Image (cartoon, rainbow, N blue to C red):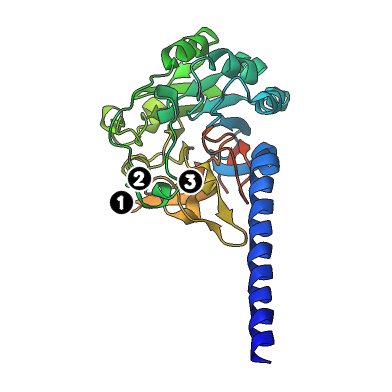
Amino acid sequence: MGSLHRVSAAGVIGKTVLSAGAVGVGCFAYASLYEVNAYALRRVEVPILPRGARPIRVLQISDLHLTPRNIKRVEWVSRLAGLEPDLVIDTGDNLSHPDAVPVVTAALGRLLDKPGLFVWGSNDYYAPTFKNPLAYLTRPSRMGREHQGELPWRDLGARFEQAGWIDLTHRRLTLEINGTRLGFRGADDAHLGRDQYALVAGPVDSEAEGEVVIGVTHAPYRTVIDAMTYDGCELVIAGHTHGGQVCVPFYGALVTNCDLDPGRVKGLSTNSAGGKTSFLHVSAGLGTSPYAPFRFACRPEATLLTLVPRV
């Protein structure tokens, strides 16, 4: 009987291992074949406009990570022009391949005819490389150094500017949209250590900058978003996190790839610094590194932020 018991236990263990393996294979197939292309549009209202102001529709595009092979992503993004936004804000990481500049412009399509602002991300400047997935959970969040394999970000910037979009990197500007003066401040990518928010820092001057001031950056590192909040920006917009990319259902993200806490890895939340509070919107983005082409419990997304009057 003891022998039969041992054989039976071994059989149960074997079946359990096989079942776990099958679940793992199924999850990987779902993440790499379905969810990575299951694009979604997030719709959010942000109450920051003066009372009586007309709503302003802002489309945020982030983390396209395009290569010439990303046909489905290009097709989906090109249809976003039908939303007819009042403003497009691109928060970086558009490129993942040296030949991707025309792919990005094809994806954006008629959106380039709209007023637009942009900042750069690390994978605009440098090509992605293969990394140990376990290191993603343990390495310091900032890359801290520049890498080889520069991408044609200057060419992409020239295309954007030819279309009338404005490079917001370390710049302040004011736009009047639907009768409201909006101020904007931009910072370069903190993930590469290129952020120099001090170049545009200082208390918000509503009379000079606009009735509402919005901060824009690629990676939501606390040094940047806290400074923007402390200065009086009412909304800070960022991307970079991929929403955690691989999440646990009913729990959420395990990592953010920066020093932002996982609870705010995507969507609309708030940020407090120095006794002041702003809205923070972090996009989960539309793409992934070509070396990690999967998402789980974290669909790729663009966001339509509708700015509405304060309550």
- Is residue 179 in view? no
Circle 2 residue: 141
Secondary structure category for the residue under label 1: loop
Q: Residues within 10 Å of mark 3 (few under 14, many from 20)?
A: some
Q: Are marks 3 and 2 in contact (CB under 8 Å)?
A: no
Disc 3 from disc 1: Cα separation: 15 Å
Q: Amino acid at mark 2?
A: Ser
Q: To which residue does mark 1 refer?
A: 274
In this rendering, is residue 106 above or below 34?
A: above
In this rendered view, identify the residue nearer to me: 57 or 252: 252
- Residue closest to the eye, 2 or 227: 2
Question: What's the distance in space between the residues labelled 3 and 2, CA to CA?
Answer: 23 Å
Asked if residue 24 lies left or right of residue 136, the reply is right
Q: Amino acid at mark 3?
A: Phe
Q: CA distance from mark 2 to mark 1?
A: 24 Å
N-terminal-most mark, 3 or 1? 1
Q: Is residue 187 above or below residue 156?
A: below
- The residue that appears at 69% across and 40% down in the rendered structure is 33
Q: Quadrant of residue 120?
A: top left
Residue 279 got which mark?
3
Which sits in the foreground, 233 or 97?
97
